[in-house]
Image: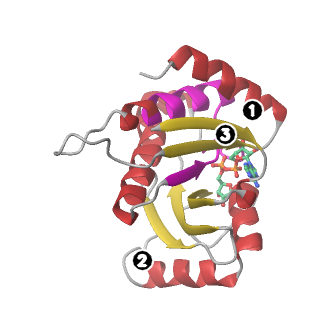
Amino acid sequence: MQITLVQGDITDQQVDVVVNAANSSLLGGGGVDGAIHRRGGPEILADCRRLRASHYGKGLPTGRAVATTAGRLPARWVVHTVGPVFLPEERTERTGLLASCYRESLRVARELGARTVAFPAISAGIFGWPLEDAARIALTTVVEEGARVAPDGSAEGPAEVRFVLFDAEAYAVFERVRREVGSG
Ligand code: APR
């Protein structure tokens, strides 16, 4: 699995899966969520509503992931995942939930047969997670997942995981942490 970092808008990425930093309602919001629904169009929300009406009556729990159409995005699917809100007194437990967002999104991407997956910096915006720690959790988890091997010995999962950082500061933090984390 190749891990790449780009600075840009996740809604521009021509990949199989774009991961959305959603909230549990799955009915849209600001940040990445707002950009994906705005650019992706109403089909994404229609799919989200169907999910709410069927499997996720109470909303998508934190740390879980679910796929919908990508609508008008240059992608095939959107995988919505709900990051934890940063809360220092519950840091350990919530760190596990943030790691789960990456792990579960990659599991759903594998089930779809996705070859390329674009992630935002989940929880590092409105949900307030300190950027460096969010980067470390993201990169550590994805490097671990990249080491997965299928029963026949072949590498399991997407060929490329791309972190799409919205500004130069986030890009610089991810680049530094990426060097520290290495390739596992
Ligand atoms: N492309 C890439 N990254 C983006 C984009 C974009 N178009 N827009 C914002 N970002 C960056 C932010 O700068 C931040 O680093 O994505 C990261 C995550 O920020 P948020 O989108 O605020 O996501 P999060 O912190 O997980 O908060 C989720 O915000 O939008 C609402 O409905 C969403 O309630 C949920 C909450």
Secondary structure type for disc 1: helix
**What is the C-alpha distance between the residues marked 2 and 3?**
27 Å
> Cβ–Cβ below 8 Å for labels 1 and 2?
no
User: Where's residue 30, x and y in %?
Assistant: 75, 60
First of labels 1, 2 by sequence position: 2
8 to 92, vertically: above or below = below
- Whether residue 60 appears in this view of the structure is no
- Mark 3 Cα shell of 10 Å, populated few (<14), some (14-19), many (≥20): many
Q: Which is more foreground, mark 2 or mark 3?
A: 3
Question: Does residue 13 appear left or right of residue 184 in this picture?
Answer: right
Q: Which mark is residue 57?
A: 2
> Cβ–Cβ below 8 Å for labels 2 and 3?
no
What's the amino acid at mark 1?
Ala
Q: Mark 1 = which residue?
A: 170
User: Where's residue 167, x and y in %?
Assistant: 82, 38
Secondary structure type for disc 2: loop
**What is the C-alpha distance between the residues marked 1 and 2?**
34 Å
Q: Which mark is residue 54?
A: none
Question: How many numbered circles are shown?
Answer: 3
First of labels 2, 3 by sequence position: 2
* Residue 128 is inside the magenta segment: yes
Residue sitting at x 40%, y 45%: 103
Residue sitting at x 51%, y 56%: 81
What's the amino acid at mark 2?
Gly
* Residue 25 is inside the magenta segment: no
Query: Which of 139 and 98 lies nearest the eye of the viewer?
Result: 139
- Mark 1 Cα shell of 10 Å, populated few (<14), some (14-19), many (≥20): some
Q: Mark 3 = which residue?
A: 124
User: Where's residue 79, x and y in %?
Assistant: 51, 62
Q: Quadrant of residue 179?
A: top right
Distance from mark 3 CB to nearest ligand 1 atom below 8 Å? yes
